[in-house]
Amino acid sequence: MRSFRRICIYCGSASGDDPIFGETARAVGAALAGQGIGVVYGGGRIGLMGLVADAALDAGGEVYGVIPHKLQELEVAHGRLTELFVVDSMHARKMVMAQLADAFIALPGGFGTLDELFEVTTWTQLGYHQKPVGILNVAGYFDHLLRFVDHAASRGFIRGPHRGILHAADSIDELLAAMASATIPDLRRTLGKIPPAP
């Protein structure tokens, strides 16, 4: 059974069209803080990003933000985090977030959230780390995406063991339990013998 010191939360810099998105973001921040799990996220104070951070901080948790110089004003960097890392690029942002976290959870978001989610899932698939990845499927937001992932698996583009890398649940407690018991597939058994990652 895994334990988590810090979990990276990917989510929107917007709040969406339903109050349930914001309510869930706040609940996730508070739940992680309540379990002594630090939050790693994109460093902004707007949208769902800000709500997760505020809720975790208000509950006494630690929150680590990572934001590129270019987005400090656009995403309005949060002013009261445990630590804010300002980096040079989106590539650096994603790398630092991944290094700081023991696991990853996506909440509702747009292109940026999906980019982060699938990149880190690919890193797990390819053995660059052994960290579980989850989707909190708030109000069915990710239903279509999950169906597409199943479709890709059914058409032979995602191997069976790799489909299991991406966990999904409707509640944060259920998702954390699934991720804590996650088994990361051995790349060499699923793809055959390949050189080690650099």
Image (tube, rainbow, N blue to C red):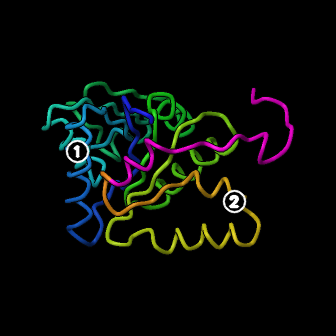
In primary-sequence order, the first of circles 2 and 1 is: 1
Q: Which of the numbered marks, if any, corresponds to residue 70?
A: none
Q: Which residue appears farthest toward the left when viewing the image?
A: 58
Compared to 73, does 69 lie above or below? above
Compared to 179, does 24 lie above or below? below
Q: Quadrant of residue 33?
A: top left
The type of residue carrying mark 1 is: Ala
The type of residue carrying mark 2 is: Gly
Residue toward you, 162 or 182: 182
Element type where label 1 sits in the image: helix
Compared to 40, does 51 lie above or below? below
Residue toward you, 10 or 1: 1
x and y, in percent, of residue 161 in the image: 67, 54
Residue at the image position 46 percent from the left and 73 percent from the top: 143
Distance from disc 2 to disc 1, alpha carbons, whole Å, reads 32 Å
Q: Residues within 10 Å of mark 1 (few under 14, many from 20)?
A: some
Q: Which residue is under mark 2?
A: 160
Residue at the image position 75 percent from the left and 26 percent from the top: 198
Residue at the image position 65 percent from the left and 73 percent from the top: 151
Residue at the image position 14 percent from the left and 37 percent from the top: 59
x and y, in percent, of residue 13 in the image: 34, 54
x and y, in percent, of residue 106 in the image: 42, 53
Is 114 placed left or right of 39 in the picture?
A: right
Which residues make up the magenta segment? 174-198
Q: Which residue is under mark 1?
A: 31
Q: Residues within 10 Å of mark 2 (few under 14, many from 20)?
A: some
In reply to whether residue 139 is colored magenta, the answer given is: no
In this rendering, the count of numbered labels is 2
Q: Quadrant of the N terminus?
A: top left
Element type where label 2 sits in the image: helix
Residue toward you, 99 or 49: 99
